Image: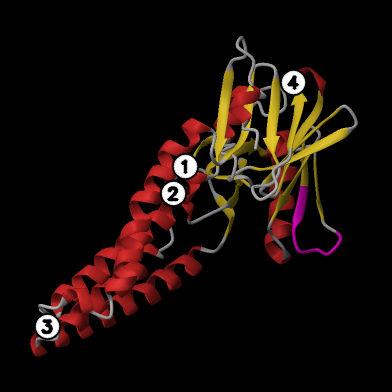
Amino acid sequence: MAHLKDMLEPSETVLHRGSTLRKLWPAFLLLTVLTLFLWAMMLADFVEDIPTHPLILPFLLFTGLIPAAVVLAFAGPKFGLGEACVITDRRIMFKRSLVRPRIDEMPLADIEDAESGGSSLFIRGGGRTLEMQAYRNGLTAEVMARVLPRWFPDAGEPAVRLGRILQPGERLIFRYPSPWINRVLRGLMLCLVLLFLWGGYEDLVDGNWRGVLSQIFWIFLMLSALPRVKNDWSSAVTDQRLLQHFDWDHSRYEEIPLAEIEAGWRSRFAEKLAARHNGREIDIPVKGKDAERVLAAIEAAKVTA
């Protein structure tokens, strides 16, 4: 099987390498936690015959998987393993499948158009289209602004809490999702954590070490599932600008002054608004009275500009 790195010419400069394996670190972390949990459960029994313990087989399995997974994730890309795409100063090379890989390539000089759609990037040129998954290939907004600045000139800004982005005197008209959604989810998670803490306390009083470890494990899972604070919003409209996360890179957001939006209208199903900016159509997940307020803010910004 040919590797992308083997197809590079000596004088070719690599601008970006996208590796699938390095995106799997959450799974490796979970494997590590499971292994530590199984090991602690075995020790909690205070048994002398650990080799015959019923948990010894899954423990050995996970223990063997962890170093193998770590080596594969961090050393594999050096040997071309898991490499999904390579962008050089001359071309884009893209591996379409991991099972039966087929490598497509497109010279940068042939690119006629490039745009994002959902979580994918579409590169068009020479009568064909390359569709690449942004996350799998590590194609962040910063990477695309560096390697294809003509079509992705704006790398946006790092996503933080919305309150830190708003300027003094700026009035928030709409945000999605509602802050109450994250508050309710966090409240439910906190209730579950407190429930497991109480169960762990009762097990500790009873001397049930296996129960204590089980409660700790479930608390870890609950805390890891809490929504990330900086991603508590994906789209917002103020009286001055439109703020929106990139569909294909939720770690960054772009901002567009309302006065620069060429047009805004309801979509056919009235479930969202569509806006045009510099020839690009942008979807705003707003409907009902919020949609009317957003359209009014766009028109007001044009009048006062």
Considering the numbered disc 1 on the image, is that residue within a helix, a strand or a loop? helix
As measured in the structure, the alpha-carbon distance from the residue carrying label 2 to the one carrying label 4 is 37 Å
As measured in the structure, the alpha-carbon distance from the residue carrying label 1 to the one carrying label 3 is 45 Å
Answer yes or no: do the residues labelled 1 and 2 have beta carbons within 8 Å? yes
As measured in the structure, the alpha-carbon distance from the residue carrying label 1 to the one carrying label 2 is 7 Å
- What residue did someone put label 2 on? 161
The disc label shown at residue 204, or none: 3
Answer yes or no: do the residues labelled 4 and 3 have beta carbons within 8 Å? no
Residue 96 rendering spot, x and y as whole percentages: 71, 43
- What residue did someone put label 4 on? 108
Q: Nearer the viewer, residue 14 or 275?
A: 14
Considering the numbered disc 2 on the image, is that residue within a helix, a strand or a loop? loop
Snapshot quadrant of residue 39: bottom left
Is 282 inside the magenta-drawn segment? no
Is 273 inside the magenta-drawn segment? yes
Q: Which residues are magenta?
A: 268-274
Residue type highlighted by circle 3 = Leu
Query: What residue sits 31% from the left and 74% below the top?
Result: 218
- What residue did someone put label 1 on? 165
Asked if 12 appears above or below 262 in the picture, the reply is above
Can you say which quadrant of the picture contains the N terminus? top right
